[in-house]
Amino acid sequence: MSSPISKSRSLAAFLPQLRSLGQPPRPVTSTACSPRRPREVPLCPVMEPGEAQDAATLPGPTKWPLLGSLLEILWKGGLKKQHDTLVEYHKKYGKIFRMKLGSFDSVHLGSPCLLEALYRTESAHPQRLEIKPWKAYRDYREEGYGLLILEGEDWQRVRSAFQKKLMKPVEIMKLDDKINEVLADFMGRIDELCDERGRIEDLYTELNKWSFESICLVLYEKRFGLLQKNAGEEALNFIMAVKTMMSMFGKMMVTPVELHRSLNTRVWQAHTQAWDTIFRSVKSCVDNRLEKYSEQPSMDFLCDIYHHNQLSKKELYAAVTELQLAAVETTANSLMWILYNLSRNPHVQQKLFKEIQSVLPENQLPRAEDLRNMPYLKACLKESMRLNPTVPFTTRTLDKAMVLGEYALPKGTVLVLNTHVLGSSEENFEESSQFRPERWLQDKKKISPFAHLPFGVGKRMCVGRRLAELQLHLALCWVRPWRRFRGCALGFPRGRSRGANSTFLCSCVSDCPQIRRRGHRPRACGDAAFGQLGPRPAAARRLLPAMRSLGGQQGRRVARW
C-alpha cells in the first residue's frame, strides 16, 4: 500500500561508527578460541575436566564487594549501553569471562564454538536464567508461569502445545491475511501522520501499535483500534504497562527482589501495577475467545491449544501474556532497525525493491508463499538483525557441571550468550560494520550457524520466531510502493554508538536536534524511514482493486483513500 515518500535524495552515509574506546584493548587473556581459520574443526580446544581450570580463575572486570562491576558499567553508560561495554570486555578478557553486577553473577560467552559446545551438550529441558522479578509477581498474585519462567517437564508440555501452531510453517502461512489487514491500516496511519515534508514525529510508537494490533488479531481475532484516530484506552494502557515493566526489570535484576517486595519500594509498586494491567487485559481477551468457541474449540487458535493440550487456564494466561508482550516490543524494534538500515543504504534499498517488484505485480498483495521467491528480502532482515539484534544476549543456566573452553563450570552457573558481540565480530563476519545482505547469499557456507542467533538457540529458541519473521517480511513487501525513502534521524547523532535494543534506541534519539520531546518521553521523527511522494501516491490507487476484494475493515480502510 502507499506511503508518503520524499523525493529528496537518499543519504549515502552509513551509520556512525562506534565511538573509540578510551584505551587500546588489552591482550586476550583467555585462549578458549582462536581466530577462525578455514577448514579447521573444532575451533575450540577440547579439554577433559581434569585439565580444565577452575571457574574462579576466569578473567573479567574488577569486582567490588557487594557491587561487583556495577560501578564500572554505570561509568561506561549504564545498562542501556551494556552491549557496547560487553564488546569491549570480550576484546580485553577473551571469548569467555566472568562478570558480577550487584547480586547477579554470570559467565559471558562470545564465540560460536563455545555456543556450539554448549548446544551439543544441553539437556532435554535446558534452563534459562531465573527471571526473579517476574516470578516474584506471579507468586505474589498467585498467577501461573509462562514459557519464559517454566522449567523442566512443565516447560516442555506448555512449549509443545504452542509450537504445534507457532513453529509449523504450514500453520503460520495461514495468517498472512490477518497480517496484511493490519498492515493496510498501518500504512493508512502513516499517511495521516506524515507532515508536508514526509516526517513522522514518533514512528516507534506507531510501530508498537502495529505490532500490538497484529499479535492481537492472530491470538484473539480482535482489533483494538490503535491505528485509528481514536485509539482504545485498553490497548494504550497495555503498551505503556509493558514499557513500565521493562524499565523496572533491569533495576530489579541487579538488586534483591525480596528487598523491593518487603520494603514495598516504588520500583516494586510500579512493577506490580504494570503486570496487573497486562494480565487484566490478557485475561479478558482469552476468556472471550474460550467462551465464544467453547463448543468448537478447533475453530480458534487459542481454544485449540487450550482444549487439546491439557493446559490449565493460568498456564494459558501466562504463556499468552509473555507472547503478546514480546511481540509488542521485539517485532516493532526489528522493523524500525531494518527501515533504518535500508534508509542508510539506498543501493540495498533499490535492489530489494527490484526483487519485490519482480515477484509481485503492483496491484497484488504479498502472500506468504510469495516470500519463497524473495531470498534477498530475507537476507536484508537477517543482516539487520545481525547488526542490531533486538535482544543483545540470551541466557542459560547450567543444569550440570561442564567444561567450556578451558574452564570447568559448576552446576547452576548462569551463562550469557552475547549475540550482539557475535554479530559485530570481524572474526565471524568480514566488514562486520557494513550492512551487506549479500553475505547471506554468497558467503553463507562460510558463516557459522552459531554466529547469528537473533531468536536464541536450541530447544529454547523463541517460539514466536516464524510469526515474527512473517510479519516483518510482509511489512517490507508493503514498503515496495514507497520507492525510495531516506534516513536522517532515526536518531543517531554523531559520536553515538549503535543501539542494540529499543531502550537504547529511545535514549539515543533523544539527543538528536531534529527530535522533539513531549514531557519526559523521547520522540523520534520518522524522516529516516518515511518520505513523501505526494498527497496520495499513485501506488495506493493501483492497489485498490486487490484491497477491496478483501472486504471487511481492511477493504473499508483502503476505500477511504
Image: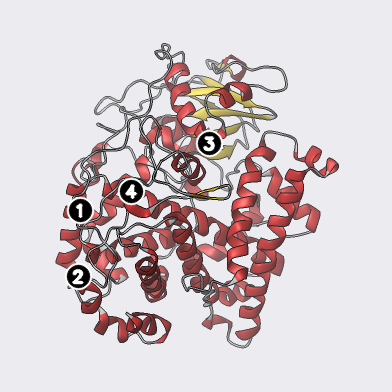
Quarter in which the C terminus is drawn: bottom left
Amino acid on which disc 3 is placed: Lys
User: Disc 4 residue type?
Assistant: Tyr
Nearest to N terminus: mark 3 or mark 1:
1
Q: Which residue is mark 3?
A: 80
Residue 350 seen in this snapshot: yes
Q: Amino acid at mark 1?
A: Ser
Would you identify the image quadrant in which residue 550 lies?
A: bottom left
* Disc 3 versus disc 2: nearer the observer: 3
Q: Could you give the CA–CA distance between mark 3 and mark 1, rounded to whole angstroms?
A: 34 Å
Q: Secondary structure at mark 1?
A: loop
SS under mark 2: loop
Disc 3, disc 4: CB below 8 Å?
no
Q: Distance from label 3 to label 2 (Cα)?
A: 40 Å
Residue 206 location, x and y as percent?
Answer: 45, 61
The residue indicated by pointer 4 is 340
